Image (spheres, coloured by chain):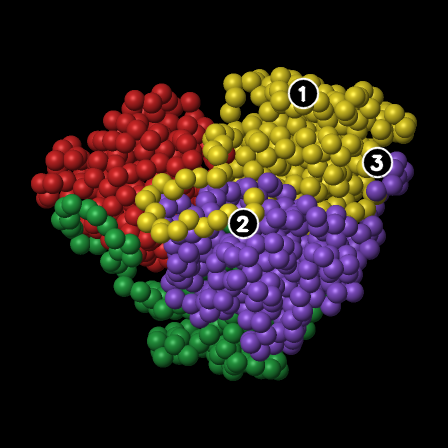
Chain colours: A red, B green, C purple, D yellow
Amino acid sequence: MPATVNVTVWNEFVHEREHEEVRRVYPEGIHKAIASSLEKEKGFKVRTATLDQAENGLTQAILDETDVLFWWGHMAHDKVLDEVVARVKKRVLEGMGLVVLHSGHYSKIFRALMGTTCSLKWRQTGEKERLWVINRSHPIVAGLGEYIELPREEMYGECFDIPSPDELVFVSWFQGGEVFRSGCCWNRGNGRVFYFRPGHESFPTYYDPQICSILANAARWAAATVRIADICPNSPPLEPLAVSEKVREPGAK
Amino acid sequence: MPATVNVTVWNEFVHEREHEEVRRVYPEGIHKAIASSLEKEKGFKVRTATLDQAENGLTQAILDETDVLFWWGHMAHDKVLDEVVARVKKRVLEGMGLVVLHSGHYSKIFRALMGTTCSLKWRQTGEKERLWVINRSHPIVAGLGEYIELPREEMYGECFDIPSPDELVFVSWFQGGEVFRSGCCWNRGNGRVFYFRPGHESFPTYYDPQICSILANAARWAAATVRIADICPNSPPLEPLAVSEKVREPGAK
Amino acid sequence: MPATVNVTVWNEFVHEREHEEVRRVYPEGIHKAIASSLEKEKGFKVRTATLDQAENGLTQAILDETDVLFWWGHMAHDKVLDEVVARVKKRVLEGMGLVVLHSGHYSKIFRALMGTTCSLKWRQTGEKERLWVINRSHPIVAGLGEYIELPREEMYGECFDIPSPDELVFVSWFQGGEVFRSGCCWNRGNGRVFYFRPGHESFPTYYDPQICSILANAARWAAATVRIADICPNSPPLEPLAVSEKVREPGAK
Amino acid sequence: MPATVNVTVWNEFVHEREHEEVRRVYPEGIHKAIASSLEKEKGFKVRTATLDQAENGLTQAILDETDVLFWWGHMAHDKVLDEVVARVKKRVLEGMGLVVLHSGHYSKIFRALMGTTCSLKWRQTGEKERLWVINRSHPIVAGLGEYIELPREEMYGECFDIPSPDELVFVSWFQGGEVFRSGCCWNRGNGRVFYFRPGHESFPTYYDPQICSILANAARWAAATVRIADICPNSPPLEPLAVSEKVREPGAK
């Protein structure tokens, strides 16, 4: 893990401008709330980026300086530029961490990395959610008890159409009767991806101290990768090959 | 598993037309060789499709009648229509099996389902490959011994940039000094995906009885899924919710 | 999968003899209820075995004729003979399927195959359980809807101390606020193991048609393995080794 | 990860006393060679323990002070006391890391944690081994290239009878024609287990700088767990249960 983890918190930043009741909860935007909570922890250098900026705020230069990218989006998934999605995906596969939040499950970047529809059940009532820790020794749950509780959240329910997670960290219980794999880890290329369910824009979830602690843990986990240098893929043999005739290469790869 | 498994073998069918030494090995195309070997087994109904056909031979009607799709491509990955790739992907996520062969690792459809670059090392010399069985009880290895040997094949080497397979079935040893995860299973949506490494166009790999047996096993395995009906994702609560005020839905999902 | 699947349903058969309210639910024992439900399906040949029989009812001859063993135990885990546990474990690793039910999570055989404590939270009140399907294309959920509901069951809660399942099939929601990985698959050696949570002795769970359907599916799934012949482990080289001096074997393996 | 990682290197220490050619390679024992290499790295406090000591050198007090235990054994697996094995297993499940080396695959402790036979193929000739990195971003491969090469080692071949690893880090190529999953990670309870293949007693493998680097990385990885406090397993409901009659508890769990 780098001594300082460079975090970029990306938010589409539309709800907060268009909906008064969301602005009341996050007057400066969800990205600013998350950035503030991370800045209180040691070892992070945090910036934010939003959809309305040039290149959606995610230029190559900014991505090159980012160890971990947080992603919150919902209404405007389709407005994210395809070339920006390709750029972010390339950086994840090179080793950048990605933490996808809540409705980001339907973002272009998450679906491109998963290869599935990422669909789920949902109910926007505002009910109790209890996130149970499934993997008690995982770095992302450091400092927690056996569960955390959120008094009011949107419901997401199974079946969540994702590849089987490499590590399952949280499963949620909902008051209305559903369950959900709420904290899931995947390796993709040299990068690590964490999906974390809570965070509907109408509720003050990102001010919850336990949620903040999980986001900080997730950033540290997602940054803790190494990277081995790439090698020329067309490789001479390492062992002697006694082959009488070399086969002609019929087509280039 | 359906009583009869409807298989479609897709091939770009370019090498066999452009390169004399490939035509010598597969005069009617790789797809015909694979189709012939499957037709000798009970329980398959086989058709073929190629790149040069209308809609690349993969119309919605044909896909709807396909339980398992085999995919061989190499030189012409970029010529496959994006809308055909999207159609195939949708069918896989709905439950169609997909068996990706050899250089198909770089096909649009495989990369879209994996979310990674799917890059690897390679050497086109023609050397011995030995595929070791890693999972001895897997249906795909039924009837085999502890390894199979191919006297001359192209080399593919690690690191293969794929998501960790849900099941690892074969690992190859190459004479020139490399190893490779040659048989890998994934679940994607309701569908099953099997990647199988051997099958360079210059070598008679698809006439090898053990390779034919593995392809038939793979088709049966990929067809053996069930499918639960979809449900309206916006779900009313199953349990009573005593919530005083309903939250307004700020944006449509 | 064999044409006929030979199933042995093992039950410690103690609650039903000692507790009147359990006997009322399962007058002939849980094993007889499960056996009856399986016998109504095609393709099974079913017998039962109980703790009080010679060698706990699981002689080598009976195990040799068993494709899939069901296991229900609770009060008398410690009374199962260690040599019987070793015999069952050996058969699982050779390829016999094992379906462990409910309080069988603490059986000697399950813990020996898992390597962990298999501990969990529990509450014996009798409350609603809803089992959500997590893997919609898995053979074990064939014929189900997106969840099944049991009006009264014992609660089991996370964190369930098991190795990460090779496939997660069900997650339960409990009325009292907990979640649980209720249907889990593992490969162990050549054998398949399925743990299925429901089935407290006080409730008529094993008469529920959907539970019966899952048990039959699980038996078919657990029987669907192949087995490759064993090879002498001390292996001569397959490739020529030009090694000047043979190293003396300092100790026997 | 603790600021200082307390490592205990355990060795049966028999070959080095009984076989002159092993003593020539490891005059003070394999454990001392490994301990020396770890002591050169920052952040480790290292001690050793051997079979011939009281309680096999692994008293409760020593284990309580151990964050990561290395294990090398071969000739004398059966001489390790069963109560010591149980004690080590308990500590692993509580959160201690365990790094199992080479012929330790057949140790009581490894087999107890895996639940399988842990059998494999082998050949004691002394041939070239090349360990390919399969997971390029894993902390255990930090600082390596795409493979490491050992000029002479014992061969271990598939099929290695282990549960599917949670993470596969290395696969070996052997000169004589076999492959092997040489670096495998598992979570067991709160602990992490790493199996690392190389290290036959006749070869100077544990002096190789790249092997030493891997062992240090493995120790850091195995120590990097967290631990959530245990909770009383018999749990009162978190949500109100309107159940008319409490069910009598027929038997104690």
- Residue B151 lies, in percent from the top left, at 71, 63
Q: Quadrant of the C terminus of chain B?
A: bottom left
Q: Above or below — where is D84 with respect to D45?
A: below
Chain of the residue on which disc 3 is drawn: D
What is the crowding at mark 3: few (fewer than 14 residues within 10 Å), some, or many (at least 20)? Answer: some
**Count the marks: how many?**
3
- Circle 1: residue type: Ile
Question: Could you confirm whether marks 2 and 1 are on the same chain?
Answer: yes
Query: Could you say whether the residue bearing mark 3 is in a helix, strand or loop?
Result: loop
Q: Depth check: B244 or C76 in front?
A: C76
Question: Could you confirm whether marks 1 and 3 are on the same chain?
Answer: yes
Q: Which residue is mark 2?
A: D250
The numbered mark, 3 or 2, whose residue comes first in the sequence reads 3
Q: Which mark is residue D62?
A: 1
Query: Could you say whether the residue bearing mark 1 is in a helix, strand or loop?
Result: helix
- Residue B185 lies, in percent from the top left, at 53, 59
Q: Depth check: A177 or B98 in front?
A: A177
Q: Depth check: A80 or A22 in front?
A: A22
Residue A90: in sight, yes or no? no
Q: Residue at x 30, y 29 (%)?
A: A209
Quadrant in which residue B65 is drawn: bottom left
Chain of the residue on which disc 1 is drawn: D
Numbered disc in front, either 2 or 1 = 2
What is the crowding at mark 1: few (fewer than 14 residues within 10 Å), some, or many (at least 20)? Answer: few
Chain of the residue on which disc 2 is drawn: D
Q: Which residue is mark 3?
A: D75
As measured in the structure, the alpha-carbon distance from the residue carrying label 1 to the one carrying label 3 is 24 Å
Question: Could you confirm whether marks 3 and 2 are on the same chain?
Answer: yes
Q: Above or below — where is C140 with respect to D104?
A: below
